[in-house]
């Protein structure tokens, strides 16, 4: 067994030109007041991994160019489109008006196991503040609320880790 280089991996994907011009998946990511720039960078990297269409950075969420975001994203901030909104509710309303289904990753009395959910494109995944979660006004607009099961003392995973799990689940389950 021999590890591939980054250059070999890009070649297997058809090269940089193909990657730049290939269509992105109808997946959006809304970051509702994410306080850690490292988490923001990690979520850019994951969004690039699933070829998400756009990230909405909302509220206190830091925006590029920031060294901590760039470092953690490994340059994905240059590949994934993003926009800033003062409040996440603005981004969610805009997406809903365009017919995008809103999926909130949050523990609520209505949330279902993320594996049991039916995901349809176009879809926006909303994730929230590391301690307070998604704002209530955004939750009210959710078409679906999903959660990751936690079997230990901790009640949640790191937001960037949880985002990676949910985005790959959405990518796997949306009809192609």
Image (spheres, rainbow, N blue to C red):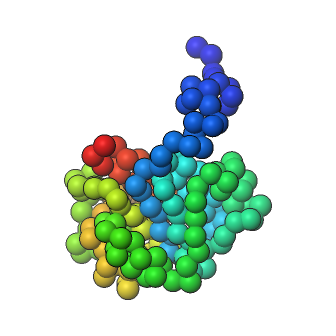
Up-down: is 93 above or below 49? below
40, 93: nearer the viewer: 93
Where residue 153 sits, quadrant-wise, is bottom left
- Residue 13 position, x and y percent, is 55, 30
Residue drawn where x is 55% and y is 57% of the image = 43
Residue 4, visible in the rendered structure: yes
163, 88: nearer the viewer: 88
Up-down: is 127 above or below 58? above
Up-down: is 51 above or below 19? below
- Residue 92 position, x and y percent, is 41, 76
Residue drawn where x is 62% and y is 31% of the image = 15
Q: Residue furthest top?
A: 1
Badge count: 0
- Residue 112 position, x and y percent, is 24, 63
Q: Which corner quadrant holds the N terminus? A: top right
Where residue 147 sits, quadrant-wise, is bottom left
80, 70: nearer the viewer: 80
Q: Is residue 37 left or right of residue 32?
A: right
24, 52: nearer the viewer: 24
Residue drawn where x is 53% and y is 63% of the image = 55
Residue drawn where x is 31% and y is 68% of the image = 99
Q: Is residue 21 left or right of residue 168?
A: right
Residue 162, visible in the rendered structure: no
Where residue 20 sits, quadrant-wise, is top right
Q: Which corner quadrant holds the C terminus? A: top left
Q: Is residue 34 left or right of residue 147?
A: right
């Amino acid at each position: 067994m021999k590890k591939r280089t980054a250059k070999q991996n890009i070649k297997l994907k058809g090269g940089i030109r193909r990657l730049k011009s290939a269509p992105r998946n109808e997946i959006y990511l809304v970051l509702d007041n994410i306080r850690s720039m490292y988490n923001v960078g990690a979520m850019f990297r994951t969004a690039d991994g699933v070829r998400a269409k756009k990230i909405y950075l909302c509220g206190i969420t830091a925006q590029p160019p920031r060294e901590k975001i760039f470092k953690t994203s490994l340059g994905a901030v240059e590949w994934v489109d993003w926009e800033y909104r003062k409040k996440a509710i603005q981004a969610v309303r805009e997406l809903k008006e365009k017919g995008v289904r809103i999926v909130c990753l949050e523990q609520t009395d209505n949330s279902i196991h993320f594996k049991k959910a039916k995901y349809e494109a176009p879809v926006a995944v909303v994730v929230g503040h590391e301690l307070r979660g998604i704002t209530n006004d955004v939750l009210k607009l959710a078409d679906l609320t999903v959660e990751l099961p936690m079997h230990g003392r901790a009640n949640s995973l790191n937001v960037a880790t949880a985002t990676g799990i949910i985005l790959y689940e959405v990518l796997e389950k949306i009809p192609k």
